[in-house]
């Protein structure tokens, strides 16, 4: 059907009503209303048929391919959006022909079609971006990258361009005007301040590899302690150990201090750092009888024999009066206990000997003298790590009485009742 024929049929009602004596203006108005109804019904039917055909054809094609990208296109409704292109194109071609008698209606409908085309283009672009994001997240290389942030940034630019374009279509003002762009930039900076900060933060987080999806982080300021499940433009989502979720502003990752446990998870061990508080009044010099008794502890017997030889040699050479133990060199029960703790850790198969290991005194406190154990467990899994740590301190706490030492403990109500 050619253009002249379409124009002839589009004016049938107008000619008929005008021939029956109706005023030309009313005849044209009713003819335009009828043409609108016919065009929109026809285009809607065509859209439904074409959409069903495109969607089904695309699904059939994606089912036969091994690549998953087309499957993600189907899930993001790309075929459905793409199917709207032909009906819009037909409307754009038919409107100037069918509404030739009404310039106002022609201009109005053409603007509507162009606005719809801009919006449709944005939705098609969004479906492609989402499909690309989901496809890349399958890869190990991009699995821990904040792909959602990049998608959101590109969508903001897409919507920004689309809105400027629609404004130009509706108002006729050129978007290339420096004044318009300057005012628009000021508005964008004001409205999207947090989004822009988040965008900058997302780039820094990704480039500097500060946080990845799956990292265990602790962010006390926001009460977050768990694994990162999502990184997007505005927020970072953390699933805490109690299965609650905490959202953290992305910008806070570079503005505030937080703890990322990835280094521990990728290392060869997990740190154990804990102190036992020794009651100061229980510390003493070891007498000969004490040393004989402690030699029964196999783990420190060679040390005691070697160390006591050095002590006796020094005292004999310097003719030290040993009537008082304080004179000359002596061993203490706390010093021997420190050596025992060090030897016990070195004998423990759950401790990584290739990493730092130390038993040390800390400064005396009002709760006693802290003996700090600093080492690394081989097993980094949380539950196993806690078991290893508990086994170590169970043994050490039970060993302390053998050295005539006491653990500091604040008095309880039972202690006061015993005194009374």
Image (cartoon, rainbow, N blue to C red):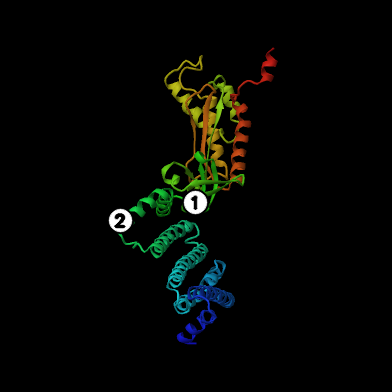
Q: Residue 179 appears at what percent x and percent y?
A: 30, 56
The spot of residue 411 in percent (x, y) is 63, 20
Foreground residue, 24 or 220? 24
Splitting the image into 4 quarters, where does residue 393 fall? top right
Residue 68 visible at all: no
Q: Nearer the viewer, residue 18 or 46?
A: 18
Instruction: Using a 10 Å C-alpha cutoff, classify the residue at mark 1 as few (fewer than 14 neighbours), some (14 to 19) or many (20 or more).
Output: few
Q: Position of residue 153 (x, y in %)?
A: 43, 57
As drawn, the label of residue 83 is none
Q: Label 1's element?
A: helix
The percent position of residue 383, horizontal first and vertical second, equals: 61, 45
Location of residue 119 with respect to 381 vertically, above or below: below
The residue located at (52%, 70%) in the rendering is 81
For disc 1, the marked residue is 266
Q: Is residue 260 left or right of residue 403?
A: left
Mark 1 vs mark 2: give the one in front. 2
Q: Label 2, on which residue?
A: 179
In the image: residue 341, left or right of residue 329: right
Tag 2's secondary structure?
Answer: helix
Q: In the rendered structure, which disc, 1 or 2, sits on the residue that comes first in sequence?
A: 2
View extreme (front): residue: 21
- Which residue appears at 49% of the width and 84% of the height? 8
Mark 1 and mark 2 in contact? Answer it, CB < 8 Å.
no
* Tally of marks: 2
Looking at the picture, tell me which residue is in the foreground, 103 or 286: 103
- The 10 Å Cα crowd at callout 2, few under 14, some 14 to 19, many 20 or more, is few
Measure the alpha-carbon separation of dots 1 and 2.
Answer: 53 Å
Up/down of 23 relative to 345, above or below: below
């Amino acid at each position: 059907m050619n253009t002249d024929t379409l124009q002839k049929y589009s004016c049938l009602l107008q000619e008929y009503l005008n021939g029956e004596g109706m005023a030309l203006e009313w005849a044209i108005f009713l003819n335009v209303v009828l043409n609108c109804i016919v065009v929109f019904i026809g285009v809607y039917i065509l859209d439904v048929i074409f959409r069903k055909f495109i969607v089904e054809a695309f699904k059939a094609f994606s089912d036969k391919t091994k690549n998953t990208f087309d499957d993600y296109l189907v899930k993001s409704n790309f075929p459905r959006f793409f199917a709207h292109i032909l009906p819009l194109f037909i409307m754009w071609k038919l409107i100037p022909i069918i509404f030739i008698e009404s310039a106002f209606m022609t201009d109005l409908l053409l603007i509507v079609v162009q606005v719809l085309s801009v919006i449709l283009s944005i939705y098609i672009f969004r479906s492609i971006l989402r499909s690309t994001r989901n496809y890349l997240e399958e890869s190990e290389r991009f699995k821990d990258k904040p792909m959602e942030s990049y998608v959101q940034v590109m969508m903001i630019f897409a919507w920004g361009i689309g809105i400027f374009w629609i404004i130009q279509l509706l108002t006729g003002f050129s978007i290339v005007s420096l004044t318009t762009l300057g005012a628009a930039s000021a508005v964008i900076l004001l409205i999207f301040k947090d989004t822009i900060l988040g965008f900058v933060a997302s780039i820094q987080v990704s480039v500097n590899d500060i946080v990845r999806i799956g990292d265990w982080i602790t962010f006390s300021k926001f009460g977050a302690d768990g694994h990162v499940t999502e990184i997007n433009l505005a927020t970072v989502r953390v699933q805490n150990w109690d299965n609650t979720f905490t959202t953290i502003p992305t910008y806070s990752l570079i503005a505030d201090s937080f703890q990322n446990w990835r280094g521990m998870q990728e290392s060869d061990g997990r740190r154990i750092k804990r102190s036992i508080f020794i009651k100061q009044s229980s510390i003493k010099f070891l007498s000969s009888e004490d040393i004989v008794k402690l030699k029964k502890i196999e783990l420190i017997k060679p040390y005691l024999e070697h160390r006591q030889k050095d002590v006796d040699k020094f005292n004999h050479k310097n003719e030290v009066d040993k009537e008082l133990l304080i004179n000359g060199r002596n061993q203490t029960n706390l010093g021997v206990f420190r050596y025992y703790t060090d030897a016990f850790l070195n004998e423990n198969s759950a401790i990584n000997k290739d990493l730092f290991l130390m038993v040390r005194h800390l400064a005396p406190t009002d709760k006693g003298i802290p003996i700090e154990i600093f080492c690394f467990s081989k097993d980094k899994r949380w539950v196993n790590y806690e078991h290893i740590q508990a086994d170590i301190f169970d043994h050490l706490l039970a060993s302390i009485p053998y050295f005539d030492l006491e653990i500091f403990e604040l008095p309880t109500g039972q202690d006061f009742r015993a005194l009374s």
